[in-house]
Image (cartoon, helix red, strand yellow):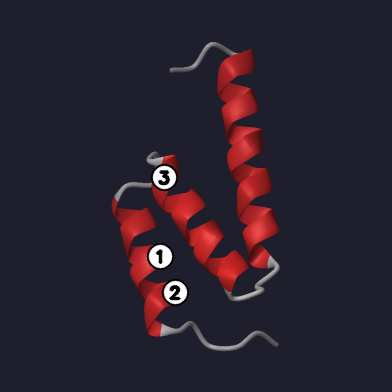
């Protein structure tokens, strides 16, 4: 079972939910998770990369 979200986690999640298409928020959260040795950082970066590749492949702006 995972630990409850910290205040900082919640702030990042709120920012991401307010603007989910802005990948900067996702990557900033991944950086913060990395600083706290949280393996979710890798997952977020892979998902962002997958999304970017998908958009490039299909010509989506």
Q: Residue at x 36, y 56 (%)?
A: 17
Q: Quick one: SS at disc 1? A: helix
Sequence-wise, the earlier of marks 3 and 2 is 2
- Residue, disc 1: 13
Task: Count neighbours of disc 2 (C-alpha within 10 A) and say few if under 14, some if 14 to 19, many if 20 or more.
Answer: some
Q: CA distance from mark 2 to mark 1?
A: 6 Å
Residue 8 vs 55, above or below: the answer is: below
Front tag of 3 and 1: 3
Residue sitting farthest toward the front: 35
**Residues marked 2 and 1 touching at CB (< 8 Å):** yes
Sequence-wise, the earlier of marks 3 and 1 is 1
Residue 30 % position (x, y) = 55, 58
Residue 58 vs 29, above or below: the answer is: above
Task: Count neighbours of disc 1 (C-alpha within 10 A) and say few if under 14, some if 14 to 19, many if 20 or more.
Answer: some
**Residue 9 shows which numbered tag?**
2
Residue 57 % position (x, y) = 64, 15
Q: Quick one: SS at disc 3? A: helix
Task: Count neighbours of disc 3 (C-alpha within 10 A) and say few if under 14, some if 14 to 19, many if 20 or more.
Answer: few
Where is the C terminus found, in terms of image quarters? top left
- Residue, disc 3: 24
**Residues marked 3 and 1 touching at CB (< 8 Å):** no
Q: CA distance from mark 3 to mark 2?
A: 15 Å
Quarter of the image holding residue 13?
Answer: bottom left
């Amino acid at each position: 079972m995972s630990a409850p979200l910290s205040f900082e986690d919640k702030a990042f999640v709120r920012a991401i939910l307010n603007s989910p298409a802005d990948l900067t928020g996702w990557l900033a959260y991944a950086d913060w998770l990395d600083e706290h040795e949280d393996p979710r950082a890798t997952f977020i970066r892979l998902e962002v990369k997958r999304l970017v590749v998908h958009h490039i492949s299909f010509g989506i702006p």
